[in-house]
């Protein structure tokens, strides 16, 4: 707080005209204990904040809860902006192993972040940016940078107020940048973790500074139901909430996750214990589909509770809500009403961890729902697959996806799967690494380049059809140095890709790769029949491939799964599932993939 501001508080105490406590706080003083830097253009009172925290355990679905609640307010015409705060010290998620932490989600601006950001983008149908994600690594880097820069004017730099000040700054920057009515703040991990304690303190400070009715605290908790007891136990939840209250935070809403609906008795116990009225202690049992959760929250009246707590009922637009909600219900009505079924084989290194392929699972689900079919996944470990046994592993699938990947393990098995798909008219979709492997397979078996490989898999190979991007050769180190984020892809007229994307000239896709097709091989591959139907404008970077003589054989250097949305399924995934359906039900009069895409991707 500046000297000027400290004086304004004194004047208020003396009964003079009240001056906004925060309005002029923009720099740093050595004379005050207050410290709350404000971003330019921040208007106090315009933006309200909803904080979502977890107790008892992680993995409760805080991101899902928070995005579904945000969606309900967005449907009412409010502008919402989510942000995820992560306790770990990595500056971004790019160097995290998806096996440990779930998939790395890439935003259009190139930020590599937590998979929860994918949930927000899908549920809100909104592109996010690096402003929607912060890690402790970023917060501390920024504080240390400012310290070296002399920004703290000789003060000892402390967790409180400087690090918490940085967190508040980040939240207010998001508010100022987006002009959001409500910023949804999800705090990773659980209350009580050492690494996120300062986030919780920052929330408390922010609520104090912003004043009454500005913030709403939601605690997600878990009600245990040990099979040996056969009844729900709320003690762990109570203790978790107590921990939150010890941090000076009174929750406004408690969402009780559980495997089955939470009993009245358990909710009453929690209500009495936590000073939260019973109607705001809600039961949130497991749901078959996350897309049913908005309705669950709505049935509990949670949307209006939040609006009342934040005193923004007057900002809503009910006509907007009616329209959005109808559209959403049209979508959810189709869930579980499928008439057909297909099995898509997905090859992958992390086959035991579903989180590492979250976007692919989602994109297949969106495509399946749109086409009225259940797109089931068969996970295929490729480490033991060869040309000889590929048929045994793939005989029962209606289509294959070879997803993104790094390194050598299972690469030859993936190539064998791709060969099988190409030679047996099995629908194929290759994503990033799967695109590169398709190029290698084709080079070896259709162009006669038997030594073809990627220098990622075999650094000294004789025919490096896939090699490091020229722009990447100069870069060292492993953090945030790939070709990352949204790029335009120029489509070649009359190709399958061009038709799938509605005959668009260019489309935007998201990338995360270090290797690419070596331009020296492009002519040779094309002469043998490979069609590069998408490329980077002004650069010889091949981004989509297809084979004209095959019912559906497509690969892309991008990650189209990242931009599939429930109400806007991604055309390549719809194309794959439609082709798989035709293969599975040859006697039915089903639309071919281009027509199917036209019907379901255009109707919105
Ligand atoms: N390893 C490959 C590359 O770096 C593919 C990356 C990926 O699939 N995301 O180009």
Image (cartoon, rainbow, N blue to C red):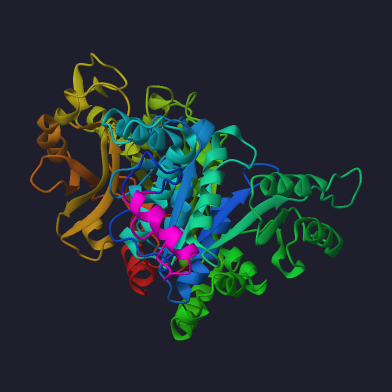
| Extreme residue toward the right, this view | 229
Question: Would residue 93 be seen by someone viewing this image from the given angle?
Answer: no
Residue for point 40% across, 63% down: 125
Q: Is residue 206 left or right of residue 3?
A: right
Residue 568 is covered by the magenta coloring: no
Q: Nearer the viewer, residue 568 or 379?
A: 568
Q: Nearer the viewer, residue 339 or 143?
A: 143
Q: Nearer the viewer, residue 312 or 390?
A: 312
Q: Is residue 159 left or right of residue 528?
A: right
| Extreme residue toward the front, this view | 14
Residue 436 sits in quarter: top left
Residue 16 is covered by the magenta coloring: yes
The image shows residue 42 at horizontal and vertical percentages of 33, 61
- Ligand 1 shows up in the quarter that is top left
The image shows residue 388 at horizontal and vertical percentages of 45, 26
Residue for point 61% across, 35% down: 193
The answer to whether residue 96 is above or below residue 77 is above
Question: Would residue 217 be seen by someone viewing this image from the given angle?
Answer: yes
Residue for point 82% across, 51% down: 234
Residue for point 19% across, 21% down: 463
The image shows residue 268 at horizontal and vertical percentages of 83, 62
The answer to whether residue 130 is above or below residue 137 is below
| Extreme residue toward the left, this view | 538
| Extreme residue toward the bottom, this view | 319
The image shows residue 290 at horizontal and vertical percentages of 58, 59
Q: Is residue 204 left or right of residue 415?
A: right
Magenta-highlighted residues: 1-26
Quarter in which the C terminus is drawn: bottom left
């Amino acid at each position: 707080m500046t000297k000027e501001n400290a004086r304004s508080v004194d004047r208020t105490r003396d009964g003079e005209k009240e001056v906004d406590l925060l309005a002029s706080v923009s720099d740093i003083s050595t004379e005050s204990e207050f410290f709350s830097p404000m971003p330019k253009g921040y208007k106090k009172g315009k933006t309200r904040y909803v904080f979502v925290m977890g107790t008892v355990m992680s993995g409760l679905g805080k991101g899902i809860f928070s995005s579904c609640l945000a969606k309900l307010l967005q449907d009412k015409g409010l502008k919402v902006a989510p942000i995820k705060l992560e306790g770990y010290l990595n500056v971004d998620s790019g160097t995290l192993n998806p096996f440990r932490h779930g998939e790395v989600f890439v935003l259009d601006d190139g930020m590599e972040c937590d998979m929860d950001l994918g949930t927000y983008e899908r549920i809100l149908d909104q592109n996010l940016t690096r402003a929607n994600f912060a890690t402790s690594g970023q917060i501390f880097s920024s504080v240390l940078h400012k310290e070296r820069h002399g920004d703290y004017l000789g003060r000892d730099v402390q967790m409180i107020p400087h690090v918490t000040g940085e967190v508040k700054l980040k939240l207010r920057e998001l508010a100022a940048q987006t002009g959001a009515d409500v910023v949804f703040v999800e705090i990773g991990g659980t209350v009580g973790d050492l690494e996120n304690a300062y986030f919780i303190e920052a929330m408390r400070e922010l609520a104090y500074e912003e004043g009454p009715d500005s913030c709403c605290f939601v605690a997600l908790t878990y009600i245990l139901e040990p099979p040996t007891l056969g009844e729900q136990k709320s003690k762990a939840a109570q203790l978790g909430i107590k921990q939150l209250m010890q941090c000076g935070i009174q929750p406004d809403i408690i969402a009780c996750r559980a495997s089955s609906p939470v009993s009245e008795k358990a909710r009453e116990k929690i209500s009495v214990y936590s000073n939260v009225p019973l109607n705001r202690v809600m039961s949130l049992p497991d749901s078959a589909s996350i897309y049913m959760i908005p309705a669950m929250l709505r049935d509990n009246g949670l949307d209006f509770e939040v609006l009342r707590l934040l005193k923004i009922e007057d900002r809503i637009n009910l006509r907007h809500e009616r329209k959005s909600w109808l559209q959403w219900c049209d979508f959810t009505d189709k869930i579980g009403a499928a008439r057909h079924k297909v099995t898509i084989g997905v090859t992958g290194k992390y086959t035991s961890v579903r989180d590492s392929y979250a976007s692919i699972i989602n994109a297949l689900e969106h495509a399946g729902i749109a086409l009225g079919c259940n797109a089931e996944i068969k996970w295929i470990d490729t480490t033991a697959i060869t040309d000889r046994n590929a048929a045994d592993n793939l005989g029962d699938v209606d289509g294959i996806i070879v997803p993104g990947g790094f390194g050598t393990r299972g690469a030859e098995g993936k190539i064998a799967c791709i060969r099988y798909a190409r030679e047996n008219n099995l629908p194929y979709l290759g994503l990033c690494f799967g695109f590169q492997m398709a190029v290698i397979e084709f080079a070896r078996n259709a162009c006669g380049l038997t030594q073809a490989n990627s220098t990622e898999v075999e650094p000294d190979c004789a025919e490096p059809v896939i090699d490091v991007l020229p722009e990447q050769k100069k870069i060292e180190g492993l953090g945030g140095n790939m070709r990352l984020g949204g790029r335009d892809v120029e489509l070649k007229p009359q190709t399958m890709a061009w038709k799938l994307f509605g005959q668009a000239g260019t489309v935007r896709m998201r990338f995360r790769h270090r290797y690419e097709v070596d331009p020296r091989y492009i002519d040779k591959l094309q002469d043998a029949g490979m069609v590069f139907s998408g490329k980077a404008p002004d650069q010889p970077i091949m981004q989509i491939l297809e084979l004209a003589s095959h019912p559906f054989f497509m690969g892309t250097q991008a990650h189209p799964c990242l931009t599939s949305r429930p109400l806007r399924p991604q055309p390549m995934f719809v194309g794959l599932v439609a082709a798989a359906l035709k293969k599975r039900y040859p006697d039915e009069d089903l639309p071919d993939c281009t027509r199917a895409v036209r019907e379901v991707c255009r109707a919105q």
